[in-house]
Image (cartoon, rainbow, N blue to C red):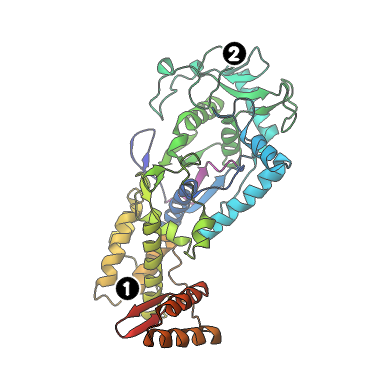
């Protein structure tokens, strides 16, 4: 099994012959609903884990929950959790639990296998404080003039190995690292612990006074603690490559004096109808929006699978609806191909999964098998679905016309015979509101 490693910029082999593969995926900051672009990253970790499992090894995945918020260029005096709490007029931890629950529901709707653990940042403060203390003792961190604790970027010789960014070329105030008015020794240093100042919520006691953790330290703390000091595969969105993963690597490696992560895997951005999905663009799509349209949420999963994880996707409602129709067709054919629940390895599908997770090649191969004369179509589809996770063996729903629907269909057929077109249109709307799809043909009306 090989995956593209962002740090070495080449395909890297994973020893799936080992009993267990340690995985870490950067989880959500639970201050709002995750949109489908966010969910693409979590599907990526699920797909990798499923391929590891397919190869006979056990994936052990940890995914953190950021529930203490973090600062960004948009939140100079506040953080995301506190800002949303003010908007909804509730306690910030109530915000965290609300959106954390919604996040887990989204994962379930996308058929994403639950991680082995979802540690919360708010419950790992003592762990972070211990690591920060160790970094200070090792001279990788210092207390600034504002009583915040900073990591000394210049002390870490290989900074920039993941992103290619060099310290000398970084400008002050780069994204996520707001200015501290001279409290730092070097402009590219970042906060491990922020002094509370006037902040009264979501603050904790520390050896350096009341405050809250910086954004990057939580992932170092949780991954090193819960994965025994070593991560085989670290997963995240491409937007986390810098500064988050660059800073996380520096912290973790400084603590254990070796590479903490073997392989860094990043998924690309999602566009929606030509634009990056964002609140400012007005094109944010949630999984619940898809479900409310009567579309199987696994249609989103199929849309993602039809594209390489390292390629941008331009998602549209048309592509989502097309994926929904493909799912319906495949499930119908699986029921027609026989009830025997056998599986058969297809060498091309197996190779595609193991070669940088080439799911588009797998989908193309399934379309070839669908059109072929093979007697083992269902077995090949079932083998692929161990990773694809499209629930292709799901029984088809059988729906029966209600007496009301039958009456309206008969009335509409009569209206069309008598050329009462206004009545025909009115009855069509009533039938569609009841969940029927009406088509008019030269032979008469049909419905589904």
Counting from the top left corner in percent of width and height, residue 445 is at 37, 82
Q: Residue at x 24, y 72 (%)?
A: 372
Quarter in which the C terminus is drawn: bottom left
Left or right relative to 337: residue 247: right
Residue under the point 50% across and 26% down: 250
* Residue to which mark 2 is pinned: 181
Q: Are marks 2 and 1 in contact (CB under 8 Å)?
A: no
Q: Position of residue 385 (x, y in %)?
A: 41, 64
Give the mark nearer the N terminus: 2 vs 1: 2
**In the image: residue 384, left or right of residue 212:** left
- SS category of the residue bearing label 2: loop
Answer whether residue 395 is visible to the viewer in this image.
Answer: no
Q: Quadrant of residue 213?
A: top right
Q: CA distance from mark 2 to mark 1?
A: 65 Å
Q: Which mark is residue 187?
A: none
Note whether 440 is above or below 17 in the view shown: below
Residue 267 magenta-highlighted: no
How many badges with numbers are in the image? Answer: 2
The residues colored magenta run: 17-29
Residue at horizontal 68 percent and vertical 47 percent from the top: 97
Above-or-below relation of 315 to 391: above
Number of residues whose C-alpha sits closer than 10 Å to that of mark 2, classed few (under 14), some (14–19) or many (20 or more): few
The spot of residue 49 in percent (x, y) is: 47, 52
Q: Position of residue 232 (x, y in %)?
A: 47, 41
Taking depth in this image into account, of 85 and 268 the one nearest to the observer is 85
Q: Secondary structure at mark 1?
A: helix
Residue 26 falls inside the magenta stretch? yes
Mark drawn on residue 377: 1
Q: Nearer the viewer, residue 105 or 260?
A: 105
């Amino acid at each position: 099994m090989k995956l593209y490693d962002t740090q070495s910029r080449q395909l890297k082999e994973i020893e799936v012959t080992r009993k267990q593969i340690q995985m870490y995926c950067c989880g959500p900051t639970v201050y709002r609903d995750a949109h489908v672009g966010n969910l693409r990253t979590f599907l990526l970790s699920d797909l990798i884990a499923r391929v590891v499992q397919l190869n006979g090894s056990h994936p052990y995945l940890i995914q953190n929950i950021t529930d203490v918020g973090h600062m960004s260029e948009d939140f100079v005096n506040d953080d995301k959790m506190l800002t949303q709490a003010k908007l909804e007029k509730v306690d910030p931890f109530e915000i965290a639990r609300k959106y954390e629950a919604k996040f887990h529901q989204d994962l379930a709707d996308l058929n994403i296998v639950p991680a082995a653990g979802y540690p919360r940042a708010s419950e790992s403060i003592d762990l972070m404080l211990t690591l920060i203390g160790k970094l200070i003792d090792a001279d990788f961190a210092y207390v600034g003039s504002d009583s915040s604790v900073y990591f000394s970027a210049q002390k870490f010789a290989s900074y920039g190995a993941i992103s290619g960014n060099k310290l000398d070329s970084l400008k002050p105030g780069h994204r996520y690292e707001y200015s501290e008015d001279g409290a730092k020794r070097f402009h590219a240093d970042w906060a491990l612990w922020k002094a509370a100042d006037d902040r009264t919520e979501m603050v904790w006691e520390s050896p350096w006074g009341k405050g809250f953790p910086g954004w990057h330290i939580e992932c170092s703390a949780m991954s090193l603690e819960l994965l025994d000091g070593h991560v085989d595969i670290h997963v995240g969105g491409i937007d986390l490559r810098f500064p988050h993963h660059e800073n996380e690597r520096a912290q973790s490696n400084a603590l254990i004096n070796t590479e903490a992560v073997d392989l860094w895997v990043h998924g690309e951005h999602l566009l929606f109808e030509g634009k990056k999905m964002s609140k400012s663009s007005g094109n944010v799509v949630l999984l619940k929006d898809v479900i409310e349209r009567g579309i199987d949420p696994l249609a989103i999963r199929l849309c993602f699978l039809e594209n390489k994880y390292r390629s941008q996707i331009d998602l549209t409602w048309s592509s989502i609806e097309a994926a929904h129709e493909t799912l319906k067709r495949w499930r119908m054919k699986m029921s027609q191909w026989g009830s025997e629940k056998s599986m058969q390895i297809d060498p091309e599908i197996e190779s595609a999964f193991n070669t940088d997770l080439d799911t588009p090649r797998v989908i193309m191969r399934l379309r070839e098998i669908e059109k072929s004369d093979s007697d083992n179509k269902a077995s090949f589809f079932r083998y692929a679905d161990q990773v694809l996770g499209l629930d292709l063996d799901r029984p088809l729903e059988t729906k029966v016309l209600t007496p009301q629907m039958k009456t309206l269909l008969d009335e509409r057929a009569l209206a069309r015979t008598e050329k009462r077109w206004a009545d025909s249109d009115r009855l069509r709307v009533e039938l569609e509101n009841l969940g029927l799809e009406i088509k008019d043909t030269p032979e008469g009306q049909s419905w589904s």
